[in-house]
Image (cartoon, rainbow, N blue to C red):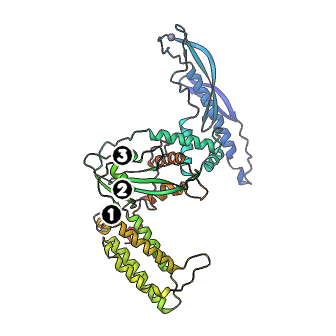
Amino acid sequence: MLRLVKIGVEGEGPCTDVMEINRPGDLVDIANLGLTLSEARRLLAGVQREVVAAQIKEHAVRRPDCSRCGSVCRVNDYRDHAMATLFGQVTMRLPRFRCAACGGIEAGVGWPSHCRSTPELDRLQAHLCAVTTYRTAADLLEQMFPVDAGKHHATLRRHTLKIGEALGECAAVRPETAASAIVVTLDSTFIRSCAEGERHLEVRVGNVETQSGGRQVFGAVAKADTDIRALICRTLEAVGRGGDTALTAFTDGCPGLRRLLADAGVTARPMLDWFHIAMRLQHLKQIASALPVEDPARAEAKTVIIAEVERLHWRIWNGKARDARISIDRIRAVMHHFQGEPDGRKSIAPSRKLWTALQALDRYLAGQSAWLADYAERHRAGLRVGTAITEGTANFLVNRRMNKSQQMRWSRRGADLLLQVRCAVYNGTLGSGFGQKFQPANDTYPQMAITA
Ligand SMILES: [Zn+2]
């Protein structure tokens, strides 16, 4: 039997029986060991009810003063208030008061009369919804905690979006000292839209980092309520942008993003993020290594191609992208050895894939030539060559949660608000007490840059 005893300054007070625990003493079946989940949940709910009841008793004796005339109030009647908590729904019988002098009605002292759930439950729900689907979050909460409210995924979604809305109204908390330098990266990606006549929604995501390791991520769906320019400004403020802060910017190369940065007061010329070049080069290397070698001529051509792809990588990394053409031409010169290579039953022939990827890279480099940097030189000087989020900000922030399955379709507003919650979780600003969520794995320098 579990019994709660109230111990005050004057010693032991009243006690209440919470629940009976009756577990077999026989441990032949190891499943008998300790509490079961359902017992633990009932226990938590029981303790919660008793703790709340004790709190209500104390709270109810406090008498408010009339807000109109300041006279003393008396109890008028009692009202039931239902409140959802992480440990079950509790019903609280609270007094309403009437002013003895003017007859005005007062709620209890400091009572948030419109509150229907505890902030802790709200935050945990939002946190789970930010990292997994609404359905999974609802399941998880129901299985682990004695929650009664918000079991349905649609309810969880509604609560989470409300928190996302509130986050948009929060001002940035400026750190005490200004940052000497900030790196900001801005990317775009797409998610599927649930609206008719609209296939995709554009999502802009970014990441700001200071030299001392401060980091914040941000994101907004284009044409939704969140103004990305204001968001960039606010995020820069949050990591300590001051008058003398040196700003370095990287983008995925989209001209629209460069404009957004300029509008947000990031006037430094944005460089093309090495991450995006590295992804293309990696793709090229994978295709090259899959080329067939069934005769000596092809084997020799493949060796040339692999070596030239490596050289291409070296050239771009070392700021010699203008010479990329030389490597591309050398690859073209031996490509004829793979002519007539048949497509697989389900796949395009590697040589054709290589050809397409090469042409795409050639076009990309030509279009981005003004925004390329000497990445090797920057790297040697200890400067950033792009985002430090290994898998890329877009993948980390958006794809992991919002693009996982092809069936996931989003409304503009829903995706935008969920993204605000997701960013807050990773920035440690949701206040869930779980702290900042950047794992060391995301902090390591991009491997592709190091091996360049
Ligand atoms: Zn009064």
Q: Quadrant of the N terminus?
A: top right
Neighbour tally class for label 2: few under 14, some 14-19, many 20 plus, Cα within 10 Å: many
Total tally of numbered discs in the picture: 3
Disc 2 and disc 3: Cα gap in Å?
A: 15 Å
Query: Which residue of the protein is positioned furthest toward the front in this rendering?
Result: 197
Marks 2,3: beta carbons within 8 A: no
- The quarter of the picture where residue 393 lies is bottom left
Residue ID for mark 1: 371
Q: Could you tell me the amino acid type at mark 3?
A: Cys
In front: label 3 or label 1: 1
When the figure is inspected, residue 100 is found, relative to residue 272, above or below; the finding is above
Residue wearing tag 3? 233
Instruction: Give the mark, 1 or 2, whose residue is nearer the N terminus.
Output: 2
Q: Is residue 144 left or right of residue 374?
A: right
Q: Residue 424: x, y in percent?
A: 46, 46
In the rendered image, is residue 108 in sight?
yes
Residue at 57% across, 58% down? 404
Does label 2 point to a residue whose CB lies under 8 Å from ligand 1? no
Task: Find out whether the residues at labels 1 and 2 contact each other: C-beta distance under 8 Å.
Answer: yes
Q: Which numbered disc, 2 or 3, marks the residue that appears first in the sequence?
A: 3
Q: Secondary structure at mark 2?
A: helix
Image quadrant in which you'd find residue 381: bottom left
x and y percentages locating residue 8 in the rendered image: 55, 25
Residue at image mark 2: 258
Is 362 placed above or below 137 here? below
Residue furthest toward the left?
A: 244
Q: Secondary structure at mark 1?
A: helix
Return the x and y of residue 12 as percentages of the image width and height: 59, 26
Cβ of mark 1 under 8 A from ligand 1: no
